[in-house]
Image (cartoon, coloured by chain):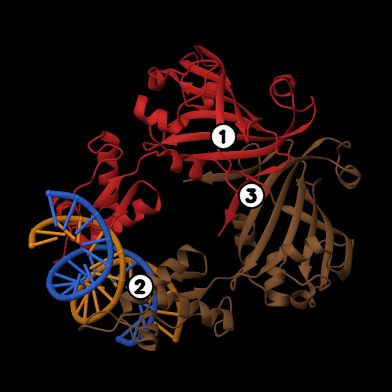
Chain colours: A brown, B red, C orange, D blue
Amino acid sequence: MTERHGTAVEAREAPDFRPLYAQVKDLIIKRLIAGEWKPGELLPSEFRLAEIFNVSQGTVRKALDEMAAQNLVVRRQGRGTYVAEHSPHRSLFHFFHICDENGERLLPISRVLTRDVGPATPEEAIRLQLSTGQEVLRFERVRLLSGVPAIVEKILLPLDLFGALDLPVGEDLGAELYVLYQQKCDVTIVKAEERLSAVAAGALEAEQLPIAVGAPLLEVDRTAYQLDGRPVEWRIARIDSRNRYYRATIV
Amino acid sequence: MTERHGTAVEAREAPDFRPLYAQVKDLIIKRLIAGEWKPGELLPSEFRLAEIFNVSQGTVRKALDEMAAQNLVVRRQGRGTYVAEHSPHRSLFHFFHICDENGERLLPISRVLTRDVGPATPEEAIRLQLSTGQEVLRFERVRLLSGVPAIVEKILLPLDLFGALDLPVGEDLGAELYVLYQQKCDVTIVKAEERLSAVAAGALEAEQLPIAVGAPLLEVDRTAYQLDGRPVEWRIARIDSRNRYYRATIV
DNA sequence: CAGTGGTCTAGACCACTTA
DNA sequence: AAGTGGTCTAGACCACTGA
């Protein structure tokens, strides 16, 4: 630990007095980023971590509780604390917000339409914080809901991280993308920002979805981030939102 | 408290063992619902509450921390714990998610178009959990963003709670609706569920907004709840989402 | 200055899991 | 039975607020 504040009169010019538990949390996250513990693995116990960082178990607990609230770790009584993993279930329930009219989660099936590699355009470079010209992967895919084409998606990924990703054009993906990112490319998505708007269907959408050009579509523009804060995916989904909706809860 | 589990061998057939702090939280929420402490008021201190409920201060703290995370109370070091209140700022930042292209929050100005009282239709009764025929208040309003009409909204309220609400047709509202609900009708919104989709503009929207019939609009269908879980507002907003978007964050 | 919430620690017991 | 996280308590000191 950098500084403790008890015991005696201390020099305390440290401009940033962060609580101990916050410092512990940062240190644990640093080790996660460094890959010391991989997704799905067990962390050391609270007492062991308390020894490592030379704080009390209660302080470690508070750090881990916050990390659990952020879905960075999963705590299981009697077992231990695990590094969070992208199960298909978590991917869907956490990152896919489309429901049918009764509020039931819909399970999508995907088919890749096109695959493309090339230098990033200026706009793409900005969105993924790359230098212009750095190589990127581009995909277009269709997702079916209840067996009907419902979503056209464009996905942009930086090639330096996703070189190992092999999405076969024309075939169904065997898993959720974020699960594949983690398993094949060691990239874990921990946060996403979405911008929703309504747009008119273009030629691509009218070709792939059972709608006419100009029909209203729900556009979800998402930037997804990994643990170190780097934006690693930009995707734009255009959704035929008749009989469906995007669900959000405000608490 | 109902039951403690320390000290000795105890009869413990209670089928639901809720942690003490959760029971304390429920009891505090019950008192909030009963109106024992009003929005903006100071709660008793942690030690005082610990006496009241006969638990330790740490247990009260955990209950209050959870309530603070849910925006039910606001904690201020050195002052105390306040019952959360709908300030204009909170209303906007928490419940209004429309931004401009740079991510800047937009401040809306409202004008009421129509006002209507009558028995609830079957659909309306379902959404507000009323008996068919119970009286409801209906409003239509236009909201301007950056001086331009951008949102047409239909708002439905049960008359039994909102009889005191007086929205003058044609005039600008002096405050955010949720602030008015709280100040004039003693109704505090604590949660909302939103369903987003894309729709084609109809006659009303084309009349009020600078767009054509059939143009894509972002529809936000919101049900808002008060502390006891009762749905007390149903509103449908249709938003001209050119140069704007609805912002969501997934963590 | 007294009173509040915020942090940190230490220790006890509980419930759950695994061996 | 041993080890884990979950709960509860008690007490210390800190930082902030307002009289």
Hey, what amino acid is under mark 2?
Pro
Give the residue at mark 1: B108
Please state the horizontal and vertical placement of residue A103, each as a whole percent of the image. Answer: 60, 41
Give left or right: position of A141 versus B22.
Answer: right
Query: What residue lies at 34% left-to-right and 87% top-to-bottom?
Result: A54
Is residue A105 positioned above or below B228 on the image?
below
Of residues B133 and B68, the one drawn nearer to the viewer in this rendering? B68
Indicate the chain on which mark 3 is placed.
Answer: A
Nearest to viewer (mark 2 / mark 3): 2
Please state the horizontal and vertical placement of residue A178, each as a whole percent of the image. Answer: 68, 66
Give left or right: position of A166 versus B135.
Answer: right
Q: Secondary structure at mark 3?
A: loop
Please state the horizontal and vertical placement of residue B248, each as a whole percent of the image. Answer: 60, 50
Hey, what amino acid is under mark 3?
His
Give the residue at mark 2: A19
Could you say which quadrant of the image residue B50 lies in?
A: bottom left
